[in-house]
Image (cartoon, rainbow, N blue to C red):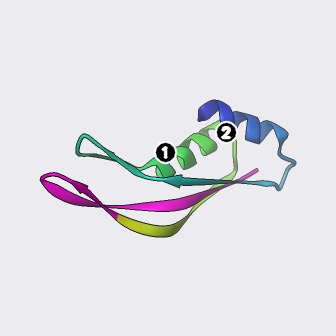
Amino acid sequence: MEGSISEMFRVLRPGGEAHIVVSNSVIHETHVLVDELLAEIGLRIGFSDSEIVVGAERIADVRPQKVRTRESIVILRK
């Protein structure tokens, strides 16, 4: 994903935006906040701003617990 975000940064004009639709995950009882990780990568690469717009929220049934997770749009601004 870092390579993809780097390419988005390269091809976007100044003032442009990249929108990435993602869903967070739960892997072996670990909640992976994919949207937050991609926003951090974008800022590290050079995007000036990031925003996370939450869409649907879901409940992942990960025994022995249930974990609230979400689908979202990561907006990266150049």
Residue at (67, 39) in percent of width and height: 5
The majority secondary structure of the magenta stretch comes to strand
For marks 2 and 1, give the CA distance. Answer: 12 Å
Furthest toward the left, the residue is 64
Q: Where's residue 70, x and y in %?
A: 42, 62
Vertical placement of 44 versus 71: above or below?
above
Judge left or right: residue 67 versus residue 50.
Answer: left
Quadrant (top left/top right/bottom left/bottom right) for the N terminus: top right
Q: Where's residue 62, x and y in %?
A: 22, 52
Mark on residue 46? none
Mark 2 — residue?
A: 5
Residue at (52, 69) in percent of width and height: 55
Residue at (37, 65) in percent of width and height: 58
Instruction: Verify CB contact (< 8 Å) between mark 2 and mark 1.
Output: no
Q: Looking at the picture, which amino acid does disc 2 mark?
A: Ile
Q: Looking at the picture, which amino acid does disc 1 mark?
A: Leu
Judge left or right: residue 69 versus residue 30.
Answer: right
Q: Residues within 10 Å of mark 2 (few under 14, many from 20)?
A: some
Number of marks in the rendered image? 2
Image quarter of residue 50? bottom right
Residue at (48, 61) in percent of width and height: 71
Q: Residues within 10 Å of mark 1 (few under 14, many from 20)?
A: few
Q: Along the line of sight, which residue is nearer the eye, 68 or 78?
A: 68
Check disc 2 and report its element: helix, strand or loop.
Answer: helix
The answer to whether residue 47 is magenta is no
Mark 1 — residue?
A: 37
The stretch of residues the image draws in magenta is 59-78
Image quarter of residue 11? top right
Judge left or right: residue 65 versus residue 46.
Answer: left
Judge left or right: residue 56 versus residue 43.
Answer: left
